[in-house]
């Protein structure tokens, strides 16, 4: 297999996992990982940006798969399906 034929698999620094439900009466959230480590939870896209900034990561494009990987939905998915 040549390098040209090999698929490119991105490894973004930020991963936002699927929507989770917590205890009854608490809002749904998504786990945020940076560099493979769980660093917190997000209730909105602004929480993702604030967490990234706290780790020195500037996000210019939330739709860039080289920067952020959204698992189980996109940046607009904040409620369980």
Image (tube, rainbow, N blue to C red):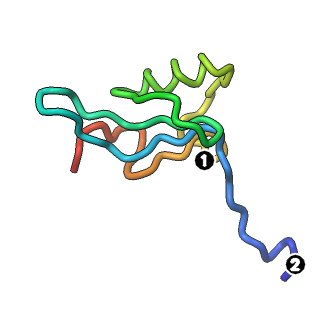
User: Are dots 1 and 2 in contact, CB under 8 Å?
Assistant: no
In the foreground, 62 or 9: 9
| Disc on the earlier residue, 1 or 2 | 2
Relative vertical location of residue 40 with respect to residue 18 in this rendering, above or below: above
Q: Which mark is residue 1?
A: none
Residue 37: percent from left, percent from top: 58, 38
Mark 1 Cα shell of 10 Å, populated few (<14), some (14-19), many (≥20)? some
Residue in the image at 79% along x and 77% along y: 5
Residue 24: percent from left, percent from top: 12, 32
Residue in the image at 66% along x and 23% along y: 58
In the foreground, 49 or 33: 33
Q: What element carries label 2?
A: loop
Determine the image quadrant of residue 59: top right
Please state, as top left, top right, bottom left or bottom right, where the N terminus lies in the image: bottom right
Q: What element carries label 1?
A: loop
Mark 2 Cα shell of 10 Å, populated few (<14), some (14-19), many (≥20)? few
Residue in the image at 43% along x and 22% along y: 47
Label tally:
2
Residue bearing mark 1: 65
Side of 24 relative to 9 (left or right): left
Residue 9: percent from left, percent from top: 68, 60
Q: Rounded to the nearest whole Å, what is the CA distance between mark 1 and mark 2? A: 23 Å
Task: Kindly give the residue lying farthest to the bottom in the view shown.
Answer: 1
Relative vertical location of residue 79 with respect to residue 39 in this rendering, above or below: below
Residue bearing mark 2: 2
Side of 7 relative to 48 (left or right): right
Task: Kindly give the residue lying farthest to the left in the view shown.
Answer: 25
Residue in the image at 41% along x and 29% along y: 41
């Amino acid at each position: 297999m040549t390098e040209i034929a090999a698929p490119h698999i991105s490894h973004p620094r930020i991963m936002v996992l699927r929507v989770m439900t917590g205890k009854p009466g608490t809002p749904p959230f998504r786990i945020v990982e940076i560099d493979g480590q769980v660093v917190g939870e997000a209730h909105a896209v602004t929480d993702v940006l604030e967490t990234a900034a706290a780790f020195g990561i500037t996000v210019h494009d939330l739709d860039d798969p080289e920067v952020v990987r959204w698992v189980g939905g996109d940046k607009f998915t904040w409620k369980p399906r």
